């Protein structure tokens, strides 16, 4: 299914200020999805993810998770861009992220209620650091289905400090699928094992651990050196499966 879409830069007003975002919507959305970017910001590839989801019928909002320190960051996929992105990553706080997701969800459901989004559950997808943040977002009741693509350090860290993000899995009311490449240097075997065990321990068989054979970090992104066409196609298919079943 491919639909004609409209896509543009926008802003979500939060209690702290205006959060930049990219908004892509089909003519008649089947549901809404929030997109959480890599450390490189809401760049061309992240916008293309929102656009592709919109073509599948999902109104998609890619939010700037670094908007407090670098509101319109678009770093390159090189060492300098990585270092810059990590500087801003280290200033993000878990509760700020949750507040941003709530503001974005309200914007979608209230400002676009005429599209029917006010009556529908929301999905969330994140990549890299955005994948880590997606696990935090999944704890919010407004999020019914979440895809966390290679969200590193969830078993050891939490944005802003505190217990590792992985300890929040029992609080997730919806469904969470975690996607990890088995050749990802940023996610050692002990982290993959911890994620798999945490998801399996949740009641109701609601969550899923998806291991991508031969894939490294960033395998979904065509602009990255570790792009893996086979794993990316499988990841897209699984994401659409989850959103189709849940949203």
Image (spheres, grey):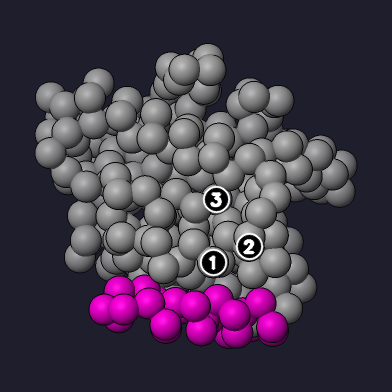
Which SS class for mark 1? Answer: helix
What is the total number of numbered labels drawn onto the structure image? 3
Residue at image point 51% right, 81% down: 196
Task: Using a 10 Å C-alpha cutoff, classify the residue at mark 1 as few (fewer than 14 neighbours), some (14 to 19) or many (20 or more).
Answer: some
Which quadrant does the N terminus fall into?
A: bottom left
Foreground of the two, 80 or 170: 170
Tag 2 and tag 1, C-beta contact below 8 Å: yes
Foreground of the two, 78 or 189: 189
Which residue in the protein does label 1 denote? 167
What is the distance, in whole Å, between disc 1 and disc 3 at their CAs?
13 Å
Q: Earlier in the sequence, mark 1 or mark 3?
A: 3
Which SS class for mark 2? Answer: loop
Q: Nearer the viewer, mark 1 or mark 3?
A: 1
Which residue in the protein does label 2 denote? 164
Task: Using a 10 Å C-alpha cutoff, classify the residue at mark 3 as few (fewer than 14 neighbours), some (14 to 19) or many (20 or more).
Answer: many
Residue 206 in magenta stretch: yes
Estimate the x, y position of residue 140 in percent, counting from the top left: 37, 48
* Prevailing SS of the magenta stretch: helix
Tag 1 and tag 3, C-beta contact below 8 Å: no
Q: Earlier in the sequence, mark 3 or mark 2?
A: 3
50 sits to left or right of 244: right
Residue 190 in magenta stretch: yes
Up-down: is 58 above or below 1? above
Which residue in the protein does label 3 denote? 133
Residue at image point 64% right, 32% down: 66
The answer to whether residue 223 is seen in the rendering is no
Up-down: is 131 above or below 11? below
């Amino acid at each position: 299914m491919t639909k004609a879409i409209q896509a543009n830069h926008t802003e979500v007003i939060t209690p702290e200020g205006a959060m930049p975002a990219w908004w892509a919507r089909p003519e008649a959305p089947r549901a809404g999805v929030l997109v959480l970017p890599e450390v490189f910001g809401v760049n061309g590839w992240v916008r293309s993810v929102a656009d592709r989801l919109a073509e599948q019928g999902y109104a998609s909002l890619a939010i700037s998770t670094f908007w407090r320190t670098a509101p319109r960051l678009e770093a390159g996929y090189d060492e300098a861009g990585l270092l810059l992105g990590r500087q801003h990553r280290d200033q993000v706080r878990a509760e700020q992220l949750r507040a941003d997701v709530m503001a974005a969800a309200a914007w979608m459901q209230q400002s676009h209620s005429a599209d029917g989004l006010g009556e529908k559950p929301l999905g969330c997808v994140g990549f890299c650091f955005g994948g880590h943040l997606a696990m935090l977002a999944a704890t919010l009741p407004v999020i019914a289905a979440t895809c966390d693509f290679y969200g590193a350090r969830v078993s050891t860290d939490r944005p802003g400090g505190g217990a590792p993000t992985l300890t929040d899995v029992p609080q997730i009311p919806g469904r969470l699928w975690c996607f990890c490449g088995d050749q990802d240097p940023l996610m050692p075997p002990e982290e993959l094992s911890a994620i798999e065990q945490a998801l399996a321990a949740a009641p109701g068989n609601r969550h899923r651990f998806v291991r991508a054979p031969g894939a490294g970090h960033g395998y979904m992104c065509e602009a990255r050196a570790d792009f893996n066409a086979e794993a990316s196609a499988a990841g897209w298919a699984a994401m659409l499966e989850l959103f189709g079943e849940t949203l």
